[in-house]
């Protein structure tokens, strides 16, 4: 009986250690509101309404833009206290309070040369079956990116898209969400 209890405890400890190693490290927030996370990095809008300001203060700087698109990917290019200077998919830069942002990885489907829809595949291979087509400007959840391919989902559908047809990842960035 003693041997099986120790074996069970050992197995549980190994599983816990393995699980902990698989989780991303939590960001350390400094006293000034900034983090130890890399800059630049991609995030997304947490709600359906978020104000972008011309500077890092909601009293001194006016609203430059109001976003009404939960999940829209943004790139954090600078941190200042609780404020994040962000860039949107069209290149607009402004400031948002960190409470308006989430670490969820999303992507923005970029326009094709012919302005038509982008193709998603059932596998990361141009010779695989077409999974579905998606219009430029759509926001997708990124679940995986390796090499030149990303697996994304939207509205209960998923598929693989070429990374360069998606705004919201860096070249060769590995995402395993």
Image: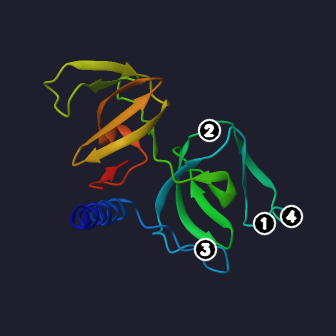
Badge 3 crowding class, 10 Å Cα cut-off, few under 14, some 14 to 19, many 20 or more, is: some
- The answer for how far apart the CA atoms under marks 1 and 3 are is 15 Å
- The answer for how far apart the CA atoms under marks 1 and 2 are is 22 Å
Badge 1 crowding class, 10 Å Cα cut-off, few under 14, some 14 to 19, many 20 or more, is: some
- The answer for how far apart the CA atoms under marks 2 and 3 are is 23 Å
Q: Secondary structure at mark 4?
A: loop
Give the farthest residue toward the front.
Answer: 1
Q: Secondary structure at mark 3?
A: loop
- Rendered image quadrant of residue 47: top right
Q: Which residue is mark 4?
A: 59
**Lower position in the chain sequence, tag 2 or tag 4:** 4
Residue 116 in view (yes/no):
no
**Lower position in the chain sequence, tag 3 or tag 4:** 3
Q: Which residue is mark 3?
A: 34
Residue 103 position within the rendered picture, expressed as x and y whole percent measured from the top left = 52, 54
Q: Which residue is mark 2?
A: 70
Residue 48 in view (yes/no):
yes
Q: Which residue is mark 1?
A: 57
The residue mark sitting in front, 2 or 4, is 2
């Amino acid at each position: 009986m003693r041997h099986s209890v120790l074996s069970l405890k050992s197995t549980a400890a190994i599983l816990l250690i393995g699980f902990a190693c698989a989780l991303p490290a939590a960001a350390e927030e400094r006293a000034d509101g900034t983090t130890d996370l890399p800059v630049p990095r991609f995030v997304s809008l947490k709600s359906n309404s978020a104000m972008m300001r011309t500077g890092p203060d909601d009293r001194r700087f006016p609203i430059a833009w109001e976003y009404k698109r939960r999940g829209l990917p943004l790139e954090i290019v600078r941190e200042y206290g609780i404020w994040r200077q962000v860039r949107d998919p069209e290149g607009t830069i402004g400031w948002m309070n960190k409470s308006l942002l989430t670490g969820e990885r999303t992507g923005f489907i970029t326009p094709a040369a012919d302005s038509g829809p982008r193709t998603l595949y059932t596998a990361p291979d141009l010779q695989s079956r077409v999974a579905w087509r998606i219009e430029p400007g759509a926001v997708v959840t990124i679940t995986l990116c390796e090499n030149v391919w990303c697996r994304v989902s939207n509205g209960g559908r998923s598929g693989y898209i070429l990374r360069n047809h998606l705004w919201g990842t860096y070249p060769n960035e590995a995402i395993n969400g």
